Image (cartoon, rainbow, N blue to C red):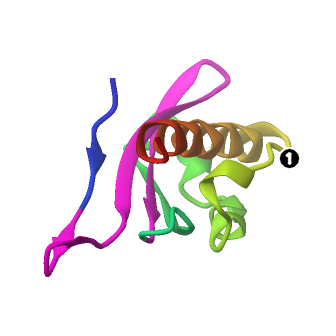
Amino acid sequence: ENTIYVPVKDGKAGGTAIIVPAVHEGRQFFLLVVTDPKLVITEVTPVNTKNVKEAEKSAAYTRFKGQSVDAIQVSGEGVDKAIAEGVKKAGAILFVRLKK
């Protein structure tokens, strides 16, 4: 189960944030995916990467900025692919739960 965080300012949603797991070579780490109110990704940050050190320094995080959560494409290899899969999972959760 994931918790969707929705910061509120002046009675309006200021965006969303969700933490999702990602797995690389059987080792788990987490991603914090932040969006604006229109569900466009503004930031992807690795969290708890002690088991997947290569996830800390990946350049893959910046490529998601500006993309709508329902348009994420999985590509890359290795840890970059694991990151893309995690971001896609986050996007699917946000889209299904908040677009209804």
User: Within the image, what quadrant is residue 61 found in?
Assistant: bottom right
Q: Which residue is mark 1?
A: 76
The answer to whether one can see residue 62 in this image is yes
Residue found farthest to the top: 26
User: Within the image, what quadrant is residue 3 found in?
Assistant: top left
Q: Secondary structure at mark 1?
A: loop
Percent of width and height locating residue 91 = 57, 46
Q: Residue at x 36, y 59 (%)?
A: 16
73 versus 68 height, above or below: above
Of residue 95 and residue 65, the one placed in the foreground of this image is 95
Residue 35 horizontal side relative to residue 54, left or right:
left
The answer to whether one can see residue 50 in this image is no
Residue 54 horizontal side relative to residue 90, left or right:
right
Q: Main secondary structure of the magenta part?
A: strand
Q: Which kind of residue does numbered mark 1 sit on?
A: Gly
Percent of width and height locating residue 22 = 55, 33
Q: Residue at x 62, y 48 (%)?
A: 54
Q: Residue at x 58, y 36 (%)?
A: 89
9 versus 26 height, above or below: below
Residue 58 magenta: no
Q: Report the span colored magenta.
A: 7-36
Q: Residue at x 42, y 46 (%)?
A: 98
